[in-house]
Image (tube, helix red, strand yellow):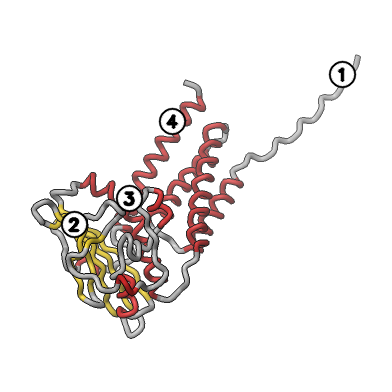
């Protein structure tokens, strides 16, 4: 096997190992992203014995101002407040509302909450105005197997903690299935919390934010690919490999930790600059040999 081919497979193994170890390291953080120890430990209505994760954000609004955005959750209603474009690639037909919808302000326990036009496996399970709103899916016997609960706790007269808790039956969701579920769930749920915060605070949504997020993610991804290609081809492979490893770690952070927008830009620019600095110095021109006497 040629040296570039050996280096390709060795490098691929290194990057995969970095991604696995990196995800294991950040997993405890994204499973409780933004939540305090007390919020993680607190019981919420509808909790299912088994696995769970808790995430939270502080909103500069009162529970009464946030509540109307919560009760209109669902496909065909207010949407999921996340990446509509990604959900719609899967045919979910999601359209996140940018205003309060009067026709969806009075849900009742037992009302259906749909994920897509053809997937409506959940029903509203708790309505405690300005405190808790949630839904759950049940098995054929009517036993809850998954719950999604949103909680509101005032911090002071103008701020509120918005907490989301998902819990899963261990009998229905073994660890491998749960990990497969948490990967896309984390991406969508962190965006959801941020969108809800913006809506409740009265900030106008901008499609440029999502465009910026995609551009930054792709910039880091492409930089990592270029660095990996240089690692395979160049004799001085150490620095390109390091840049490729850092790019993999940055992608994990961008995907699963939802850093501030300004920090994402700094990470991307810093990585691109690091790749530029790995270019080998230009070789000095060789001096011509003196002509020999005849």
Q: Nearer the viewer, residue 279 or 222?
A: 222
Alpha carbon separation for disc pair 3 and 2: 20 Å
Q: Is residue 253 left or right of residue 130?
A: right
Any mark on residue 137, and which? 2
State which mark lies toward you, 4 or 2.
2
Q: Dot 4: within a 10 Å radius of its alpha carbon, few (fewer than 14), some, or many (20 or more) residues?
A: few
Alpha carbon separation for disc pair 3 and 4: 26 Å
Residue 28 picture location, percent across and down: 29, 56
Any mark on residue 183, and which? 3
Q: Earlier in the sequence, mark 4 or mark 1?
A: 4
Number of marks in picture: 4
Query: Which residue appears farthest toward the right when viewing the image?
Result: 294
Any mark on residue 292, and which? 1
Q: Earlier in the sequence, mark 2 or mark 1?
A: 2
**Circle 4 is placed at which residue position?**
9
Q: Is residue 209 left or right of residue 44?
A: right
Kindly indicate whether the residue at mark 1 contacts the one at mark 2 (C-beta within 8 angstroms).
no
User: In this view of the protein, can residue 65 be seen by the observer?
Assistant: yes
| Residue drawn at x 30%, y 75% as measured from the top left | 67
Kindly state the secondary structure of the residue where label 3 is placed: helix
| Residue drawn at x 35%, y 62% as measured from the top left | 79
Q: Dot 3: within a 10 Å radius of its alpha carbon, few (fewer than 14), some, or many (20 or more) residues?
A: some
User: In this view of the protein, can residue 38 be seen by the observer?
Assistant: no
Q: Is residue 236 left or right of residue 137?
A: right
In the picture, the quarter occupied by the C terminus is top right
Kindly indicate whether the residue at mark 3 contacts the one at mark 1 (C-beta within 8 angstroms).
no
Q: Dot 2: within a 10 Å radius of its alpha carbon, few (fewer than 14), some, or many (20 or more) residues?
A: many
Kindly indicate whether the residue at mark 1 contacts the one at mark 4 (C-beta within 8 angstroms).
no
Kindly state the secondary structure of the residue where label 2 is placed: strand
Residue 254 picture location, percent across and down: 43, 55
Query: Which residue appears farthest toward the top when viewing the image?
Result: 294
Any mark on residue 117, and which? none
């Amino acid at each position: 096997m040629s040296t570039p081919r050996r280096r390709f497979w060795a490098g691929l193994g290194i990057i995969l190992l970095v991604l696995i170890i990196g995800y294991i390291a950040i997993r405890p953080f994204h499973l409780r992203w933004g939540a305090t120890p007390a919020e993680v430990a607190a019981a919420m209505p509808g909790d299912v014995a088994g696995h769970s994760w808790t995430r939270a954000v502080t909103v500069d609004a009162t529970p009464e101002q946030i509540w109307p955005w919560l009760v209109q959750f669902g496909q065909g209603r207010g949407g999921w407040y996340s990446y509509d474009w990604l959900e719609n690639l899967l045919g979910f037909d999601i359209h996140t509302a940018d205003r309060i919808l009067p026709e969806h302000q009075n849900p009742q326990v037992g009302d259906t909450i749909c994920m897509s036009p053809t997937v409506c496996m959940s029903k509203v399970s708790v309505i405690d105005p300005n405190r808790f709103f949630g839904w759950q899916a049940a098995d054929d016997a009517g036993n809850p197997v998954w719950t999604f609960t949103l909680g509101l706790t005032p911090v002071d007269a103008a701020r509120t903690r918005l907490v989301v808790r998902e819990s899963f039956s261990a009998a229905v969701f073994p660890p491998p299935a749960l990990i497969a579920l948490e990967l896309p769930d984390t991406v969508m749920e962190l965006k959801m919390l941020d969108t809800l915060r913006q809506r409740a605070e009265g900030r106008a949504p901008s499609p440029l934010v999502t465009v910026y997020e995609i551009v930054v993610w792709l910039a880091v991804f492409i930089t990592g690919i270029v660095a990996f290609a240089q690692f395979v081809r160049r004799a001085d492979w150490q620095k390109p490999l390091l840049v490729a490893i850092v790019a993999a770690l940055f992608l994990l952070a961008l995907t699963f930790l939802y850093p501030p927008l300004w920090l994402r830009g700094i990470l991307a620019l810093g990585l691109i600059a690091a790749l530029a600095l790995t270019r080998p110095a230009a070789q000095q021109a060789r001096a011509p040999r003196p002509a020999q006497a005849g």
